[in-house]
Amino acid sequence: METPWIRPITAVFLFVVAWGQVRVVAGPMQDSDSPAAPIGTVVPDVIYGRVDALALTYDLLVPVAKPNGATVIFIVSGGWNSVWFPPEMAMVPEWNGMSLLHDLLVDGYHVAVVRHGSAPRYKIPDAADHVRKALQHLRKNAAKRGIDPERIGAFGFSAGGHLSLYLAMLGGDEATPALRSSRSEADGAIDPGAAPVAAVVVWYPPVDIVRIVGPSESFPALDFDPELADEISPIRHVDSGDAPVLIQHGTADRLVPLEGSRMMLETLKKAGVPAELEIYEGAGHGFKADDAIRSSGLAKAWFDRWLLPQSDAVSPSR
């Protein structure tokens, strides 16, 4: 049965454009012929797992600026399909108003560009498992990368937003024994049951897969055993141990209704999870111009609030 509010997504993110159509630079242009110094370096194709003998990878962007210890995961997913693009494209100063990855790198964040197995071969439960493995790999290797495993954030758009929310809801009752054990030497500074990510920003995310699971010509990732849908529906797994969430959604979104984000916000607040919903009047599924600029700035401020040291006063459990 085809879900009426789902239609094909033609682009996964702002960077998924023809390579030759964008002039890629590392920092603000001093003049038309003299680009600024690079803002980051790339550790490409870090293997975080394997499935069906295929490698699952992320690209790690390392800031040239003094690292602040925090890391943000960008989940590349549209319609639960991941695409590859040269990771250097993530360093452009701005694309259609969005400058989030550039700004994070400039301020000393590490950025992990995470890709998962794509439909039609891999379904949503597979994608959720893959991004969870990527997060576990980052946490396990945090010390040698010089990052703090307790200051990792995540963001994504649409399907990438759903997968980011999935990671945010892995606290409390969902916190695994392995996650709790990894915090056993933290002297009580970290709640053992806190989610494995410390902050999440999502744009127009599907929040309840139970309502949309089933055969879909447009989105084959939805065609899987309905019995598995509850486990990967973020709105059904909210509790007080989950990560702070900023949701951004437009009123004119015909692909993913705004009502789902409103319900997610209400559920998070009832559980005592810090959450905000920013609504964009007239915006559809994909922000442009001023909406893109505004949403990028709010996302950066959210990560600064929860991942940098001054957030201690706001979130004492982390």
Image (cartoon, rainbow, N blue to C red):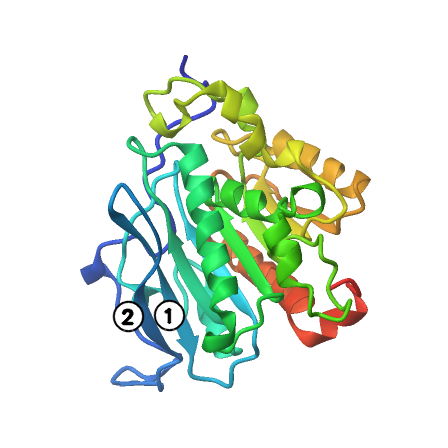
Q: Residue type at mark 1: give it.
A: Met
Query: Is the Cβ of the residue at disc 1 closer than 8 Å to that at disc 2?
Result: yes
Mark 1 lies on a secondary structure that is helix
Name the residue located 33 percent from the left edge and 73 percent from the top edge.
Answer: 42
In the rendering, at what x and y percent does residue 316 appear? Answer: 80, 65
Q: Nearer the viewer, mark 1 or mark 2?
A: 1
Q: Residue furthest top?
A: 1
Name the residue located 41 percent from the left edge and 23 percent from the top edge.
Answer: 224
| First in sequence: mark 1 vs mark 2 | 2
Q: Is residue 198 visible?
A: no
Where 192 sits versus 7, above or below?
below
In the rendering, at what x and y percent does residue 194 appear? Answer: 70, 54
Front-lying residue, 283 or 247: 247
Where 273 sits versus 32, above or below?
above
In the rendering, at what x and y percent does residue 124 appear? Answer: 43, 34
Answer left or right for 215 relative to 263.
left
Quarter of the figure with the N terminus? top left
Q: Residues within 10 Å of mark 1 (few under 14, many from 20)?
A: many
Name the residue located 44 percent from the left edge and 70 percent from the top edge.
Answer: 102
Front-lying residue, 138 or 25: 138
Q: Quadrant of residue 23?
A: bottom left
Q: Is residue 220 visible?
A: yes
How far apart are the alpha carbons under marks 1 and 2?
A: 8 Å
Quarter of the figure with the C terminus? bottom right
On residue 24, which mark appears? 2
On residue 91, which mark appears? 1
